[in-house]
């Protein structure tokens, strides 16, 4: 992995489904001119099969995996799935996950992976505001595995992204940006309750965009459901029902997620106090911030930051894979 594509890590232990495992945070530091990383065939190796799950990780970017052959077990948050030939997997930022080759299950999977933060990659196209209809990737509750045969357009787009990344021909960065923009749009349609021919789903979803935009710009302040509902021309109860149906989480859960993601960025990239970060991220108190952080990441903000510092002092770079 070159100097422009750095990944720092920090670990702690916690209980996952009753089993002690290591939890590892990986922060990908992207090249500002082209914030995109592709781990292609032959650039990494999977760890040796283990009879038990020993660790999970999460990172600050979106991950897309494409499985060419074989199969593995994929863990995402509390879900366990089979990731096999012809599948693609989508992991949102900050979601705990790991792929594991089970012992005694053959030679494993042949996979390739893409890492990027959509808002950074497409910043030149959307300098003022990222389209809310492309923000589906941040949600935790969509299905993580899709079979290529069930979504041929998505599969074709990702194959083209891999081809562009492998060849790195003139103008390939523009091609990758365009292809991944189309990927975000098409996946948003697939995850929409309405079909592509039925625009009802889109209009129902777009009616909530004022609230999504407001949360993204004002998460640090006091945000009430009734105010969000008013922006969208709904009653609070109707707004809450629509939000949960269309985005698969409550408005409060979405706001909490946005605040925690911002807090993670500040914990890693600044020397601000825990109190300042909690207030800047929109939490009413340090105790509320600590409780929410611990519930999501299984350790306190201070533990999370201290682990990061201990690694940075040693100037370590770590990947599960050999690149």
Image: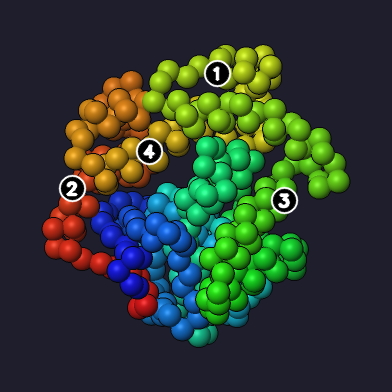
Mark 3 and mark 4 lie on one chain; the one further toward the N terminus is 3
Q: CA distance from mark 1 to mark 3?
A: 27 Å
- Which numbered tag is attached to residue 262? 4
Identify the residue shown where x is 18% and y is 57%: 312
Q: Secondary structure at mark 1?
A: helix
Point out the residue furthest to the right here. 197
Identify the residue shown where x is 45% and y is 25%: 218
State which mark lies toward you, 3 or 4. 4
Crowdedness of circle 1 by 10 Å Cα count: few (<14), some, many (20+)? some
Q: Is residue 104 above or below residue 261?
A: below
**Residue 58 drawn at (x, y percent):** 39, 55
Q: CA distance from mark 1 to mark 4?
A: 21 Å
- Whether residue 66 is visible: no
Residue wearing tag 1: 225
Crowdedness of circle 3 by 10 Å Cα count: few (<14), some, many (20+)? some
Q: Secondary structure at mark 4?
A: helix
Identify the residue shown where x is 28% and y is 60%: 8
State which mark lies toward you, 1 or 4. 4
Identify the residue shown where x is 60% and y is 80%: 69
Where does the N terminus fall, quadrant-wise? bottom left
Q: CA distance from mark 3 to mark 4?
A: 28 Å
Mark 4 and mark 2 lie on one chain; the one further toward the N terminus is 4
Closer to us: 270 or 264: 270
Q: CA distance from mark 2 to mark 3?
A: 41 Å
Residue wearing tag 3: 190
């Amino acid at each position: 992995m070159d100097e422009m594509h750095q990944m720092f890590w920090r670990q702690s232990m916690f209980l996952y489904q009753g089993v002690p495992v290591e939890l590892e945070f990986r922060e990908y530091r992207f090249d500002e001119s082209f914030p995109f990383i592709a781990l292609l065939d032959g650039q990494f190796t999977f760890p040796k099969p283990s009879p038990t799950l020993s660790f999970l990780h999460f990172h600050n970017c979106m991950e897309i995996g494409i499985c060419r052959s074989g199969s593995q077990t994929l863990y995402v948050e509390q879900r366990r799935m089979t990731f096999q030939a012809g599948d693609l997997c989508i992991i949102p930022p900050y979601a705990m996950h790991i792929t594991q080759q089970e012992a005694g299950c053959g030679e494993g999977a042949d996979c390739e992976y893409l890492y990027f933060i959509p808002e950074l990659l497409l910043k030149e196209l959307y300098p003022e505001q990222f389209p809310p209809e492309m923000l589906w990737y941040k949600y935790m509750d969509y299905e993580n595995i899709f079979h290529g045969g069930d979504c041929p357009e998505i599969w074709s787009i990702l194959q083209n992204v891999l081809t562009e990344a492998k060849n790195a021909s003139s103008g390939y960065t523009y091609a990758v940006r365009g292809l991944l923009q189309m990927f975000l749009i098409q996946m948003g349609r697939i995850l929409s309750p309405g079909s592509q021919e039925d625009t009802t789903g889109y209009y129902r979803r777009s009616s909530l965009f004022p609230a999504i935009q407001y949360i993204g710009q004002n998460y640090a302040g006091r945000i009430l459901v009734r105010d969000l509902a008013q922006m969208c021309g709904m009653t609070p109860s109707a707004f809450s029902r629509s939000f949960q149906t269309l985005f698969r989480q409550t408005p409060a859960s979405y706001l909490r997620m946005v605040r925690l993601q911002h807090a993670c960025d500040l914990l890693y990239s600044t020397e601000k106090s825990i109190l300042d970060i909690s207030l800047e991220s929109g939490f009413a108190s340090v105790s509320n911030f600590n409780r929410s952080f611990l519930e999501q990441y299984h350790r306190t903000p201070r533990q999370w930051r201290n682990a990061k510092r201990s690694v940075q002092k040693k100037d370590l770079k770590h990947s599960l894979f050999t690149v």
